[in-house]
Amino acid sequence: METVSTSKAYGGTQGVYRHASTSTGTDMTFAVYVPPHDDGARLPVLWFLSGLTCTHANVMDKGEYRRACAELGVIFIAPDTSPRGNDVPDDEAYDFGKGAGFYVDATEEPWAANFRMRSYIENELPALIAAEFPMADMTRQGITGHSMGGHGALTIALRNPDRFRSVSAFAPIVAPLHCAWGEKALGGYLGQDRATWRAYDACALIEDGARVNAILVDQGDADGFLADQLKPELLAAACDAAGIDLKLRMQPGYDHSYTFISTFLGDHVAWHAERLK
């Protein structure tokens, strides 16, 4: 692991790191904020998965999470959203290819060799964090994310309920089987057998028996993607049928941007911290 940069913030350290990933076959960059702590302390970990077109830098620069993490003693990890590099296949559209990994393991060519973000987030990067950050208590992990990253957070938590004690999301894509973003991404990465898509659809996973104790979702009611792409009512219906405690907060006047995320990210850090005690 190479240290790209470090800086002090609220008594802790905001770092950016790079390593050669075996999952993606590329170098991958990620950000980690470690709050101030006593020697030998073990701190809970909160993952943040970003949305379409983003890198680790978007939430690091605009998320305003460090004060809450410092006060509550939470490590904050922000991975990239896809493999990068000149040899990595791409698409001209913003919602497919680089910056749009959708947190899946692709099976279709030419994507299968590099676009393995599910394996990267679920297995490779946590192992690296455990090895390189001894203060990280990997028995206490939570996960959150925005939009495409909200989809990633929900599906990863639902597939790994023993690993993640808490899950939340900002404006998540909750049912990619039923929106244009999801149909394009899952069809392109996984092929046209829609049965294989269900492992990457939060509502379908819940319908198929996956469970978590509780979910927190913040959604702006002025979000331009609300009706066509996000459809939180489908998650509400799935959770209601399954008996999952969903706290869906419709936030008046908020859109899909980081001004929305930064307003409520401190709330999410606190919500996770309470469950990761």
Image (cartoon, rainbow, N blue to C red):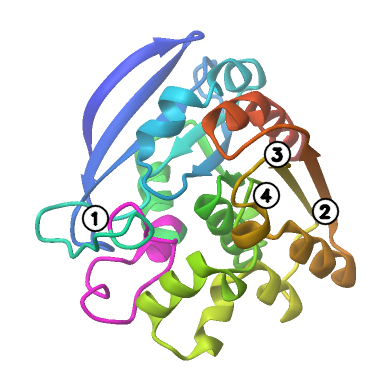
- Alpha carbon separation for disc pair 3 and 1: 28 Å
Tell me which amino acid carries mark 1. Answer: Ser
Q: Nearer the viewer, mark 4 or mark 2?
A: 2
- The residue to which callout 4 is attached is 167
Q: Which x, y percent locates residue 41? A: 56, 25
For residue 177, which quarter of the picture? bottom right
Observer-nearest of 86 and 161: 86
* Mark 3 or mark 1, earlier in chain: 1
For residue 155, which quarter of the picture? bottom right
Secondary structure of residue under mark 1: loop
* Mark 4 or mark 2, earlier in chain: 4
Secondary structure of residue under mark 4: strand
- The magenta span reads 98-121
| Category of crowding for the residue at label 4, using alpha-carbon neighbours closer than 10 angstroms: few (below 14), some (14–19), many (at least 20) | many
- The residue to which callout 1 is attached is 21
Please say if 127 is above or below 196: above
Please say if 13 is above or below 126: above
* Mark 2 or mark 1, earlier in chain: 1
276 with respect to 61 (left or right) = right
Q: Nearer the viewer, mark 2 or mark 1?
A: 2
* Mark 3 or mark 4, earlier in chain: 4
25 with respect to 29 (left or right) = left
> Which secondary structure class fits the magenta region best?
loop
Q: Nearer the viewer, mark 3 or mark 1?
A: 1
- The residue to which callout 3 is attached is 276
For residue 86, which quarter of the picture? bottom left
Observer-nearest of 16 and 165: 16
Tell me which amino acid carries mark 3. Answer: Leu
- The residue to which callout 2 is attached is 246
Residues at discs 3 and 2 in contact (Cβ within 8 Å): no
